[in-house]
């Protein structure tokens, strides 16, 4: 490997690190904003079903982050009595999206692939 290639590779890694740091900061900002929205729902400042559903949809965008999952669960628990159908449907959607992904990732990590309909 030439010195120029090494320099190029290091620049690439530096750019990737910077991108990851920016993404992390954006996630932190989104978490703060969603925390405020969930707090407003809990304090009954936001009560409309469409508004709550929009918040739930947004939280699902980050559903693989434990912080957002905790907010999502708190929100679901709080609004369940008023909007049980919304919560049930949303939880089913969440499970479909994230549990299937987790199953696929587990299978890939174990080196196997699942073949639909074959039982493998």
Image: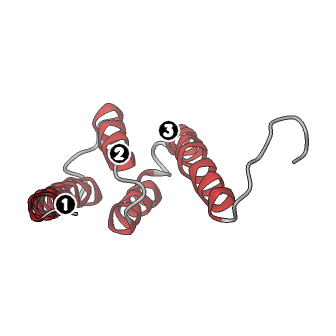
Give the structural element (helix, strand or loop) at label 2. loop
| Location of residue 119 (image quadrant) | top right
Q: Measure the alpha-carbon separation of dots 3 and 1.
A: 34 Å
Q: In the displayed orientation, state which residue is furthest to the front.
A: 2
Earlier in the chain: of badge 2 and badge 3, it is 2
Instruction: Answer above or below: position of 82 versus 40.
Output: above
As drawn, the label of residue 81 is none
Q: Residue at x 19, y 50 (%)?
A: 45
Do callouts 3 and 1 mark residues in contact (Cβ within 8 Å)? no
Q: What crowding class fits label 1: few (fewer than 14 Cα within 10 Å), some (14-19), or many (20 or more)?
A: few
Measuring from the top left, give residue 74's x and y in whole percent: 40, 63
Q: CA distance from mark 2 to mark 3?
A: 17 Å
Mark 3 or mark 1, whichever is nearer to me? 1
Q: Which residue is mark 1?
A: 20
At numbered mark 3, what does the secondary structure look like: helix, strand or loop? helix
Q: Which image quadrant for residue 50?
A: top left
Q: Residue at x 16, y 62 (%)?
A: 2
Q: Is residue 64 left or right of residue 20?
A: right
What is the secondary structure assignment of the residue under circle 1? helix
Q: Nearer the viewer, mark 2 or mark 3?
A: 2
Could you tell me how far apart the alpha carbons at marks 1 and 2 are, in whole angstroms? 17 Å
- Which numbered dot is residue 86? 3
Instruction: Give yes or no for contact between labels 2 and 3 (Cβ–Cβ under 8 Å).
Output: no
57 vs 110, left or right, is left
Q: Residue at x 87, y 48 (%)?
A: 120
Q: Nearer the viewer, residue 114 or 33?
A: 114
Total number of numbered discs in the rendering? 3
Q: Which residue is mark 2?
A: 61
For disc 2, the neighbor class at 10 Å (few under 14, some 14 to 19, many from 20) is few
Earlier residue among tags 3 and 1: 1
């Amino acid at each position: 490997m030439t010195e120029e290639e090494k320099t190029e590779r290091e620049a690439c890694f530096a750019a990737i690190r910077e991108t990851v740091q920016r993404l992390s900061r954006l996630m932190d900002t989104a978490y703060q904003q969603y925390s405020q929205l969930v707090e407003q729902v809990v304090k009954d400042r936001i009560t409309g079903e469409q508004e709550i559903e929009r918040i739930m949809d947004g939280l699902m965008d980050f559903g693989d982050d434990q912080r957002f999952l905790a907010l999502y669960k708190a929100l679901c628990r709080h609004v369940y009595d008023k909007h049980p159908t919304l919560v049930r449907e949303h939880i089913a959607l969440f499970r479909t999206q994230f549990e299937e992904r987790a199953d696929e990732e587990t299978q890939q990590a174990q080196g196997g692939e699942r073949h639909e309909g074959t039982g493998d």
